[in-house]
Each structure stands twice: as C-alpha cells, then as structure tokens.
Amino acid sequence: MVDARNAARLTLFVALATLLLALASLPLSGNLEQQAGVLVARPAAAIRDATRPLADVILNAGQVRELSEENAELRRRVARLEAEAAALRESAVAAHAVTSLLNAVGDDAGGFLPASVVLRDPAPASNGLVVDRGAADGVATGQPVLGPGATLVGIVSAVDPDRSRIRLLSDGASAVTAVVQEPRVPGALAGTRDGLRLEFVPVDAPVGAGDLVLTSALGGRLPGGLLIGRVVSVEAPGQALFATVVVEPLADYARLEQVLILTNPVVLESTALESAGRSE
C-alpha cells in the first residue's frame, strides 16, 4: 500500500514537471510566472513582517541579557558609592563633633576619652546610653560624661570590655551633688519624670531663674565645677522647708551622638567655669 502511494506521488510530480516545461514554451508563460510570483510574494511579505519582531527578540536575546546584567552591576556600584559617600559624611560629622567637644574642655582635653553613642535605652522610665568605649579603653564606673559645651550629661554606670553604659542626669535613679554658681547654694540634682530638679535648697536661699548649676566636689564622687544647667524656676510652697528648683540642662540629651568620658580624675574647675562664662 505504501509503495502504491509513493508511486502515485511520483507520477503526479512527473506530470506537473512535464506541464510546466510545456507551458514554458508558450508566449504567456512569462506572465504566468510573474503573476504567480506576485501572488506568492504578498503572503510571504506578510508572514515575514509578522514574524520579524519574534525573530529580532530571538536574535537579540543574548544582547538584552548582557545589557540587563550590566545594568544590574551599575546599580550595585552606584549603591556602594552612595553608601561610601554617606559613611564619609558621617565620619566628617563625628570628627567635627569630637573636635568641638575637645575644644570645649580646652587644656584638659588629654584627660577625656571621646566615645560614640551606639544605643539608647528604649525603656520609658530609664534614660541611658551605650557608648563604644569600655574597660579596655580605661573607662570605669562612676566616671563623669560630658556633652556639648563641656556640660555634664551623665555618669558611667556599667562597663564591659568594649562597651559602657551611661546613666543620664535625667534618669530617675540619677543623683549628683551640685551647687548654684553665684550664691554658692548647695543641693542635690535629681532626675525626675519631668526633668532635672535641684533638691534640698532652702526656701529662703537667694536662687533665681538664670543661675548656673555646677557639680560640687562634696562627697568626692565628682570633680567640682562641671557645668550642668541653668535654673528655670524656683517655687517656695508656704510651709515647705525646701524650694522646688527646676533646672534645664544645657545639652539636648535626646540628640547626643558623641560624648567625652573623663578618665583622668584631675580636672581644673576653672575650665568648667570658663565654659559656663562663654555660654552666658
């Protein structure tokens, strides 16, 4: 059966070939070939136009993939450059802040260790910081910590080999001996939920708004003369023995990024007093 079909097809092809040869000798054969070519050319052009986009995609697929890879690599390089530029800007800002802190303490800068704030205590009832200096750098508990303008902002409360925790003066557990500068009225500076309070100040003490508050050497825990803040208000209830003295810190505790830790216990009181005079 298969041989019969193949024989029939061969016979048909031979007949067609014979017919074409016969027609080629006729005068109209050229027109027939031309017309046949026109008829075939139109659908062939349509098929070519329809398949050209797909062919272009197939031919350019490799180039598109290479361009995509190059684009991705360029984006990665730009991201790295932006990160490096941001790091350089942050380093410049930190260096400027440290320079300002050291300039504020003047000739005693050698006794201070610069430190960067790496963590803030998220607890609402606690005001503390963690800095990137620790026992390996000479930090010990009880050392005072200064912020902008040589202002006392806290005390070292815990030390690890390469980290230290700072208890800010605004912390509820903070209490340092202090003195009002001009009248030399002593008191205890305590951190409260509402801010700093100078406690145990007699109601008749000559303390008023605008007076500077400094650390006192009484008790031996801190060197005297470190600037703390300024008196905002003084209230003297009728039968109370002590006035309510509200003190405003001269440093913004919420924005501290660089601090100085006093690792040398010898500090000249004149340095802090000069800083206080410049802040007036």
Image (spheres, grey):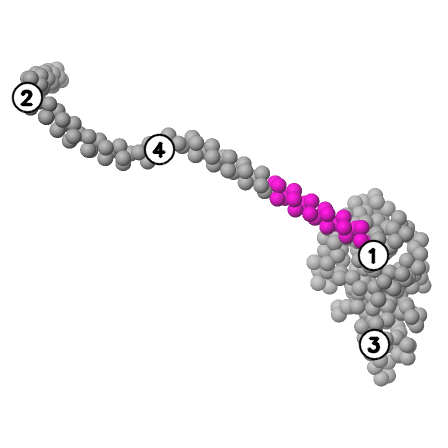
Tell me which residue sits at (89%, 50%) in the image: 111
Look at discs 3 and 4 and give the one toward the viewer: 4
Q: Residues within 10 Å of mark 3 (few under 14, many from 20)?
A: some
* Circles 3 and 4 in contact, beta carbons < 8 Å: no
**4 displayed left or right of 80:** left
For disc 3, the marked residue is 234
Residue 17: quadrant of the picture: top left
Identify the amino acid type marked 3: Val
Does any portion of residue 173 appear in the rendered image?
Answer: no
Identify the main secondary structure in magenta: helix
Distance Cα–Cα, label 3 vs label 1: 26 Å
Q: Is residue 237 above or below residue 193?
A: below
Q: SS at mark 3?
A: strand
Please provide percent x and percent y for residue 56. Answer: 35, 33
Q: SS at mark 2?
A: loop
Residues drawn in magenta: 80-101
Q: Which comes sooner in the sequence, label 3 or label 2?
A: 2
Quadrant for the C terminus in the image: bottom right
**217 displayed left or right of 84:** right
Q: Residues within 10 Å of mark 4 (few under 14, many from 20)?
A: few
Q: SS at mark 1?
A: strand
Please provide percent x and percent y for residue 222. Answer: 90, 59
For disc 2, the marked residue is 27
Tell me which residue sits at (88%, 75%) in the image: 207
For disc 1, the marked residue is 146
Look at discs 2 and 4 and give the one toward the viewer: 2
Identify the amino acid type marked 1: Leu
Identify the amino acid type marked 4: Asp
